Image (tube, rainbow, N blue to C red):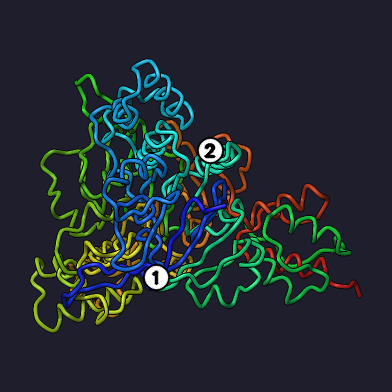
Amino acid sequence: MKPLIAVDSITYTYKPNTGASVPALRKLSLQIAAGEHVAIVGANGSGKSTLARHLNALLLPDTGTVRINGLDTRVTAHHPEIRRLVGMVFQRPEDQTVATLVEHDVAFGPENLGLPPAEIRSRVQHALLTVGLWEHRQRPPHMLSAGQMQRLALAGILAMRPDCIIFDEVTAMLDPEGRRAARTLMKELHAEDITLIRITHLMEETLDAQRVVVLHRGAVVMDGTPQEIFRDAGKLQCLGLDVPPVARLADALRRHVSGLPENVLTVADLVDALDRIPHHTTSCHNPPSLSPSPQGPTLIESAGLGHIYMRDTPFAHRALKEANLMVHEGCAHGLIGATGTGKSTLLQHLNGLLKPQEGTLNVIGYPLHEPQTDVRAVRQRVGLVFQTPETQIFEQYVGDEIAYGPRLTGLVGAALRDRVRWAMALVGLDFEAFKDRFTFALSGGEKRKVALASILALQPRILLLDEPTAGLDPASRRDLIARLRTLSCPRGGPAPLDSGADRSDRPEMTLILSSHQMEDIADLTEELTVMANNTTVLHGSMTQVFSQREQLQAWGLEQPVVIRLADELRARGWCLPEVIANQEDLLAQLRCRLATPR
């Protein structure tokens, strides 16, 4: 039987025959059968999205062929049928949004198929109910959160009812509950014999697939079942990838405990494996503390903060109400909450992009709720990296983009070049390799690094990060988190911005991080604020907040893998401290209980 998708030795280069040419695909061959569920993974810039765009003829190969159900994508007359067969949910959902209302956007595809109005209405309703956007059907798409925009893009594809759907990093901006719902939906679609191709940097998501294809520098380098692929953790690490978090934890534990099987990939598997190993409950190391960390001076404080988008119009939408926030200097602060709860809106208030409509807000002594406050002075001290980095990139070349802000502050010549080099190194971009690259030719993850570097180059006192690791491959994510840790302030706080102190070698910044990746939050932050129903509902230390398992689940969130595993073991009767803060804490406790009693 012929494959649904047949890719034969294709190559593709962005900007060929120019000094800025970027080879994206190199003699790549791949076959996918009808009804398969395939995950495609690879480091940033490995060619994943470029390959995906070849599968529905958005891009055509320089050499080689792509055939969809036998139809050659190079034949223009085949394109309508190919795009009916293969639908794609883009990495940036804004790229496929065409209408001014949510329900009209979902109807666009079925209308172009010439379907009867009653059938179009039925498909639109079913698609919006499936992705949880029915109540938002009359809203303008640009007023949705980034996670809701991804759901809208998926609804538009579902309404077309294609034979194959490509998901390009569609869960990157979704909250934990949204990711679970998306994974469940994909399983349901696959059960209906729809071919699924999932591009992801979240290794645990690949466990749902029958097959994992690994790309490196535009070519297929590994192809097998998830169990086969994750058996070679060393090779994956060399390729900028990783095993799922549970497998990484099991590998670390296996070095100290005998009897733990290979290829443990899920929390349930690891709990079962540990529970089968003889263990005891004698008192072990001092348990992690639930008490909050010492606090420095207050840098940010809000009370009763509220915001309504498009106020006094028929499209008015409340995004923030009665939000109370306190951020201390020298203490990395996390914001967590379900999609659409107001996290991005709150962050945009903290550097004056949005002015308080209700309540009060003080940032480094500047009362932003007062009209006469110098907002420009605040923005010089508070840098914001947007949820969608493409919205803040406007220069043609990477080096010019990162140099733009420091140049406005008067930095020139060697000092400017050194600042750009420093910022690029901080996010893991090689200066010589990237400074002359076209920004539009970067991968999604590379654009995110450039956007972050452009803000870091300003060396702000407060750094606001909105989903900073979304779209990054596992190695880049680990590297970025480690680098951001080096910016954390000592408890005494940094020298004042205007004191003349030299901050060029290691500028100290207070970090405020919003993320749907609970592992990132646990790795980087010390204090947490939880948002639900567009307001702040819980404050505390990271360990205090993540101890509230049932409440977090009610808000559509989840605990990090390490804390979930500890809870599951506790439910099996293991005597563990109420809170395990990180992997090191858990390993210490498990090693103690799995050791042979003396």
Q: Are marks 2 and 1 in contact (CB under 8 Å)?
A: no
Which residue is pictured at 52% across the width and 63% down the height?
A: 213
Residue lying farthest to the right in this orientation: 598
Question: Which residue is at the front of the view, 350 or 484?
Answer: 484
Looking at the image, is mark 2 or mark 1 nearer the viewer? 1
Question: Which residue is at the front of the view, 383 or 287?
Answer: 383
> Badge 1 is on which residue?
218
> Badge 2 is on which residue?
556
Horizontally, residue 22 falls left or right of residue 183, namely left
Which residue is pictured at 74% across the width and 69% down the height?
A: 262
Q: As shown in the figure, which amino acid type bears the numbered disc 1? A: Gly
Estimate the spatial distance between the alpha carbons at disc 2 and disc 1, rounded to whole Å.
Answer: 37 Å
Which residue is pictured at 23% across the width and 69% down the height?
A: 457
Location of residue 310 with respect to 418 vertically, above or below: above
Location of residue 160 with respect to 382 vertically, above or below: above
Location of residue 367 with respect to 16 vertically, above or below: above
Q: Position of residue 539 (x, y in %)?
A: 48, 44
Where, by quadrant of the figure, is residue 306 drawn?
top left
Where, by quadrant of the figure, is residue 242 drawn?
bottom right
